[in-house]
Image (cartoon, rainbow, N blue to C red):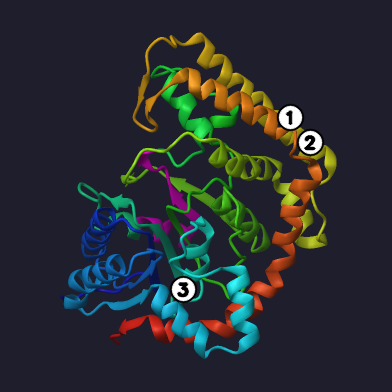
Amino acid sequence: MGKIVTHPSLAIKIVTRDNYKGFKSSLESVYDDVTKGKLDPAIIVIDDSRNRENRQRNRDMLLKIFEKDSFSIYYLGRGEYAMAMAEAPSKTKQKMLLLIGMLGSETYQPSRAKNASQCVDAGSTYDLLLDGDVTIRSQGMSKGGIIGESLAKAKANDSYVSVRLKGFPDVSLVQLLERSIIRDGDRLHNWNEDDSPYSLSGGFLLYAREEDLPIFPNLYNEDFLWVAYGATRRHKKTAKLDLDVLHQPTNVKCFCLNRLAYEARGEISFATVNETVIEDMIENQTLPNSIEIKSAIREYREYIKHVMLLLRKHDQSTPLHSNYLGKVDLRECGKILSKHLEDIRGISYRTIQNLFENWVRYQNEWIKAKQAITGYVTEKATLSYSY
């Protein structure tokens, strides 16, 4: 097709899980954008789908869209990942299963596919991590396309680059509830504002590939924490662009206590991370202190109380129809938040410190294990390679 390679080498790593329709839309939009920009990236799919039939459909779709133009294509699903582990040294296998787990597991972990993606090496200078429910809409863009523009920004500013995702906000349940209640134009609570330099969504995240990139923690806000660690360690900037990239999950979110508990630890952890905290963790292995963590816990509790007050002020006699949460029973949400507020009392500063401690402790182990396994994973993931 006569591509003109005018950009640094790029690998686009698309992570998906049991979402064929969204994945198809995402793949097609990537194809349209890179051909528009005359890019010649490697296309890598990390498939965390549980069902073998779903994985086969995804693999076939990947080939159908990209193989005809001789793109370099890689597919990593449960089978390919398991075969790579089977050939790796026993200690490496054990360590990787501890740090990542097995693709296609019944239990969903957002960090799992992201970490598996780091083990596929297409020889790229830059990687774009993309969720399989994200669609790139480059109509009306300049000839470079959205990915090309993001790549140029990352290169020019030595930055981690993301976009302001349109459509479904990539935020917590409580933040979705607040956005469902308030009227258009009303100001969000400070907790719901996106003002941290590290809050770059893993749904669309472009960065320079390095051998010692950190591990994504198995924690909510794993992408924000990953950017904070990586950008600080490498003294890089961050940038969030206003481009037409749409986030479209298959279903609305379910407002439930278990999910709130999971998100709370990640929300509090990220609220603890500022430039001083992350620098101390990297340079001195110093964990956030009790004052910093207790302050974040207190701020999170105040935010929950704020949303509960919004609920009480809203007309609770009829259900709320939310674009994010579906049909919402406000009284039931109030009860769930009240119980959640009680549960937060069980989160001590030491609980959060332990999360940071494990994450920092795993960094060196992760880098060594990843270096040992990457060749096996890349070989099993390779579908075609053109020079």
Indicate which disc residue 125 carries. 3
Is 230 magenta? The answer is no
Q: Which residues are magenta?
A: 149-168
Q: Is residue 187 visible?
A: no
The mark lying in front, picked from 3 and 1, is: 1
Q: Tell which of 255 and 275 is nearer to you.
A: 255
Q: Amino acid at mark 1?
A: Arg
Residue 24 tag number: none
The amino acid at mark 2 is Lys
| Three-letter residue code for mark 3 | Thr
Disc 1 on helix, strand or loop? helix
Please say if 273 is above or below 210: above
Question: To which quarter of the image does residue 50 belong?
Answer: bottom left
- Residues under numbered marks 3 and 1 in contact, where contact means CB atoms less than 8 Å apart: no
Check residue 166 for magenta coloring.
yes
Residue 386 visible to an observer of this rendering:
yes
Residue underneath mark 1: 298
Q: Residues within 10 Å of mark 2 (few under 14, many from 20)?
A: some
Q: Could you say where residue 68 lies in the image, as x and y percent from the top left?
A: 16, 77
Instruction: Judge whether 312 appears above or below 342 on screen.
Output: above
The residue wearing badge 2 is: 294
Comparing labels 2 and 3, the label whose residue is closer to the camera? 2
Q: Are marks 2 and 1 in contact (CB under 8 Å)?
A: yes
Residue for point 63% across, 31% down: 340
The answer to which of marks 2 and 3 sits earlier in the sequence is: 3
All told, the count of numbered labels is 3
Q: Could you tell me which residue is drawn at 55 percent across and 88 percent down?
A: 88
User: Are the residues tagged 2 and 3 within 8 Å (C-beta)?
Assistant: no
> Which of the 4 image quadrants contains residue 259?
top right
| Percent x, y of residue 139 | 20, 48
259 to the left or right of 83: right
Q: Which type of secondary structure does the marked residue at label 2 adopt? A: helix
